[in-house]
Amino acid sequence: MSVLIIGFTVIVVLLIVVVTDLSKVFLVRRDLDATADGAVLAAANGLAAVYAQPGPGSNAELDPEEARRLTAEYLDAVAAGTRFDAFDWSADVTGTTVTVELTSSVDLPFTPPGWQGSADVGSTSSATVPIR
């Protein structure tokens, strides 16, 4: 009977460890998603105000450097660099679409022997700049 109790206790403790670690990764990823959405919207809204339309019926030519500048300003405003560990980002423009990619590392609360002590998470968000 004591072997069963010890076995079930080990299983319950491992489940608690796994659920706690996964919950932390999920919460950080959700925060990273929200930050990526905000950054891409800030870039898209700023670009919509400054795009150069070459002529009627054609697509706007967006400036990738301006997209990066607007994204950096937003990420600085929300202090993303201090909220996330090993934070990195990129902003790209393809046609009328702005894409922001954020990556971060999450330190796990529990690190059982043989497990990694951190997990890498990432988020990508895109927005289309309307041409009027």
Image (cartoon, rainbow, N blue to C red):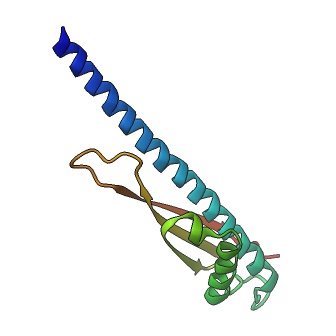
Q: Is residue 72 above or below residue 82?
A: below
x and y, in percent, of residue 50 in the image:
79, 86
Q: How many marks?
A: 0
Which residue: 36% across, 45% down? 110
Q: Relative to residue 69, is residue 29 drawn left or right?
A: left
| Left or right for 81, reference 76 | left
Q: Nearer the viewer, residue 32 or 82?
A: 82
Which quadrant of the figure contains the C terminus? Answer: bottom right
Q: Quadrant of the N terminus?
A: top left
Q: Residue 23: horizontal and vertical position, in percent?
A: 48, 42
Choose between 16 and 63: the one closer to the eye: 16
Q: Residue at x 65, y 70 (%)?
A: 79
When the figure is inspected, residue 35 is found, relative to residue 10, above or below; the finding is below
Q: Position of residue 60 (x, y in %)?
A: 71, 84
Tell me residue 103's x, y (percent). 48, 66
* 28 up-or-down from 17: above or below: below
85 left or right of 130 in image: left
